[in-house]
Amino acid sequence: MTGPRIALAVLWKDIRLDLRTRDRLGHMAVFSALVVVLLSIALPTPTAETRPWLPVLLWVVLLFASLLGLTRSLQTETEEGALAVLTLAPCDRGWVFLGKGAANLIALLGIEVWTAGLFSVFLGLAWGPALPEAIWAGLLGGVGLAALGTMLTTMATSARFREFLLPVLLFPLALPVLVIASRATAEALDGRSVPGLWWGALALYDWVFVVIPYLTFDYLLED
Amino acid sequence: MSAVETQEVEKRYGPVRALRDVSFSVPEGTVTLVAGPNGAGKSTLLRILACLTRPTSGLIRILGRDPFRKDGPALRSELGWLGPEPGLYADLTVEENLAFVARLHGSDSGRVESVLEELGLAAMRHRRARTLSQGYRRRTGLARALLHQPRILLLDEPWNGLDEEASERLTKVLQRHRARGGTVLVAAHAVPAARELADQVLRLEQGVLRMLPGGPREETHG
């Protein structure tokens, strides 16, 4: 049980750091709030035609907020050379990925709830009956973003232009999540049932971006 | 059995050959000084032995096993590493940093107490790593490296940033580790204490091992 123990230790350590410093969550929350307030001022009052754009904007805000959170997570590991501690963990390093990924997911889910609330207050997005399917979209989309982000953050650790490299890699690879999750959210808000194929595609995406880094984290952690 | 053995290890960073055909062996229960000027490849060699980076080619054996194959996870629990950075989370306290490493390695929580005492860190236990002086950060990093009682210690310039008292304490810690049968590889330059302590010296120059291990406390040409 070495691997699960280590994954839980990494997860708990990241949660403790998040709760103590509130750097990561604070940056993401303030960023989301600023963008939503700006959108509420700049956008015309949503009409039946323009309302379907709101879920897309929501997921774009989440994507940028997740980038902020991932960058902060990377700084925590590199600031005093702590990444070496994780690299030396006596287990398959895939478990370290699962611990880091779970911590990133929890932070992202928190920001999803916060941002969804902001959209509701400032842009009049009524979740109501759409909530169950919106939660599924948030969960499946969140897993994909967190897994992909954790993998790319680790890859970028020793890169020279890592602050530049991370978005350049993250945004195109996160496009399927952005497209499917925002469409699923829009369908749910419209009162239509989300096609099963979309859920399947999101789940497949999550599976791919959990399994690939799990199997390759040994190499990703080494420089 | 050799604690560490390398055969024709080479490490390239693009066109730069950081290590070239480095072959040596380190017996268990000894202290080996890895000496050489800046840029000689000392840190690269130690990082390879600590499984933090892979060699481009060549063979590595740690306690008779290949650390880059399936034995890697088990072998990593036998390694204690202190690099140029202390390997700490800046916003965790000294005690929390050590407790985290104890959980990673499944060490008894009593070990945290004993390394805090051993390295004179008990009074600093509730201080966040960010607020420590350079010297105390190094000490905490050393405590982290020692916490899980590794058989092999890999230390890169561990005397840097330490005051006289901490340097003496470090030297004693390394002597005790050797006395218990542990092995130490330490990269340092111009540190008399390191020369005093070393059973053998490996000298690297531009990635090439110029001198090979000889008898106790002497440098011999290869």
Image (spheres, coloured by chain):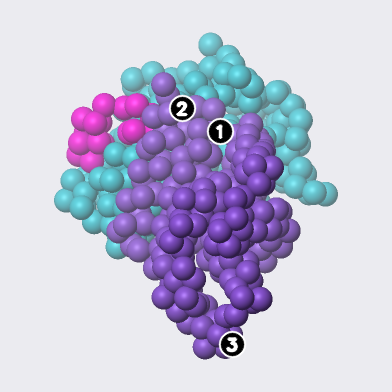
Quick one: label 2 or label 1, which is nearer the N terminus?
2
Q: Which segment did they paint magenta? A: B102-118
Numbered tag placed on residue A168 in the rendering: none
Using the rendered image, report if marks 3 and 1 lie on a common chain: yes
Using the rendered image, report if marks 2 and 3 lie on a common chain: yes
Numbered tag placed on residue A44 in the rendering: 3
Q: Are marks 3 and 1 in contact (CB under 8 Å)?
A: no
Numbered tag placed on residue A3 in the rendering: 2
- Quadrant (top left, top right, bottom left, bottom right) of the C terminus of chain B: top right
Q: Nearer the viewer, residue B31 or A85?
A: A85
Name the element at disc 2. helix
Name the quadrant containing residue B183: top left
Horizontal side, residue B94 vs residue A156: left or right: left
For the point 41% across and 75% down, which residue is it?
A121
For the point 55% across and 51% down, which residue is it?
A137
Q: Are marks 2 and 1 in contact (CB under 8 Å)?
A: yes
Using the rendered image, report if marks 2 and 1 lie on a common chain: yes
Residue projecting furthest to the top: B1
Q: Residues within 10 Å of mark 3 (few under 14, many from 20)?
A: few
Amino acid beneath label 2: Gly
Q: Which chain does the numbered disc 1 sit on?
A: A
Is residue B69 shown to the viewer in this render?
Answer: yes
Amino acid beneath label 1: Gly
- Residue B108 is covered by the magenta coloring: yes
Report x, y in % for residue A143. Answer: 54, 46
Placement of A130 over or under B78, stated as above or below: below
Q: Which residue, given by chain and number where applicable, does mark 1 sit on?
A: A94
Query: Is the magenta region chiefly helix, strand or loop?
Result: helix
Q: Nearer the viewer, residue B94 or A47?
A: A47
